[in-house]
Amino acid sequence: MQSALPAQFDVVTYEPRGLGRSDAPPGLWSMRDYADDAVSLLDTLQIPQALVLGESFGGMTALHLAAYHPDRLRGLAVMAATAGGAAGRSYPIEEWLNLDAEATALAALKVQDQRFRQLLRTDPAAAAARLAQRIAMETAFRACPANAAGYPRLLQARAGHDAVPVLPQISCPTIVMAGRHDNQASFAAVKWLSDHLPKAEFWVFDGGHGFGFATPDPMARLIAAWTAAPYSDQENCE
């Protein structure tokens, strides 16, 4: 991860259940399971409270974490994620599950950044380079046997994501971030999420679904916010 965060904070990242080297417990998985996994990690590392940043599926997980385990968060930042349910879910990317790597890569680029379709017309060489990069990423992801088995189960949990009923339980200060050109987590749905959280502020960036780490600005703003009140205070989720 290319980010300024590790220079300012002790950063913990992990692979969700069923992906990479993480365990794949039997049975159906829910978003609540993913939130509980995060708590188990905090317990293992003996971290009583944390500032939590979640992007995309990680943002969905973070909403459930903040709702069901509010004592474990000092603050929350959610990027490119929606509340799901009646509020409008993120794009159903499970539709791509049976596509080959090239078709998945092309579909993802078109959905995750509205500008990519125009790039195909105006600069085919640049579009081809981005597509090749995405195909390589898709191919590497699929090459891991654990991902091949665990990713469909993750997508099943994602399809059932609905944090709308528990949003009032999220009492910690929250930053909700949207990419202006993102069609996977649409601007309207992310704005709805921000409007329905008790203590949220809404930030907008000129990017697609991956805006959070595409330029330094989002993390620079987040670091500035998290090193000041109220995020620098303890026990914000009471």
Image (spheres, rainbow, N blue to C red):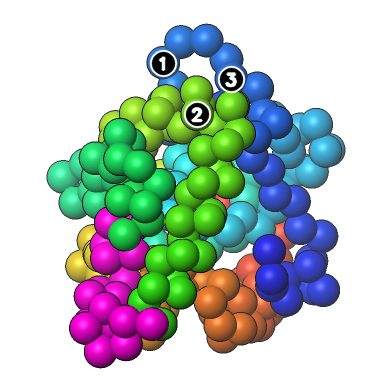
Where residue 74 sits: x, y (%)? 64, 57
**Tag 1 and tag 3, C-beta contact below 8 Å:** no
In this rendering, position of residue 219 left or right of residue 83: right
Secondary structure type for disc 3? loop
Instruction: Say above or below: 79 vs 180.
Output: above
Where residue 78 sits: x, y (%)? 47, 60
- Residue 28: give its label: 1
Residue 171 in view of the camera: no
Q: Which of marks 1 and 2 is nearer the N terminus?
A: 1
Quadrant in the picture for the N terminus: bottom right
* Picture residue at 24% right of the left edge, 44% below the top: 92
Where residue 91 sits: x, y (%)? 25, 51
- Please name which of the two marks, 1 or 2, marks the residue nearer to the observer: 2
Instruction: Say above or below: 176 vs 63.
Output: below
User: Disc 1 marks which amino acid?
Assistant: Leu
Residue 167 within the magenta-colored segment of the rendering: no
Q: How crowded is mark 1: few (under 14 residues within 10 Å), some or many (20 or more)?
A: few
* Picture residue at 37% right of the left edge, 34% below the top: 155
Q: Residues within 10 Å of mark 3 (few under 14, many from 20)?
A: some
Q: Name the residue under label 3.
A: 24
User: Disc 2 marks which amino acid?
Assistant: Ala
The magenta span reads: 107-125
Q: Nearer the viewer, residue 138 or 190?
A: 138
Secondary structure type for disc 2? helix
User: Disc 3 marks which amino acid?
Assistant: Ala
Q: Nearer the viewer, residue 141 or 199?
A: 141
Instruction: Say above or below: 86 vs 228.
Output: above
Q: Mark 2 points at which residue?
A: 148
Q: Nearer the viewer, residue 224 or 37?
A: 37
How far apart in space, not on screen, are marks 3 and 2 (Cα)? 12 Å
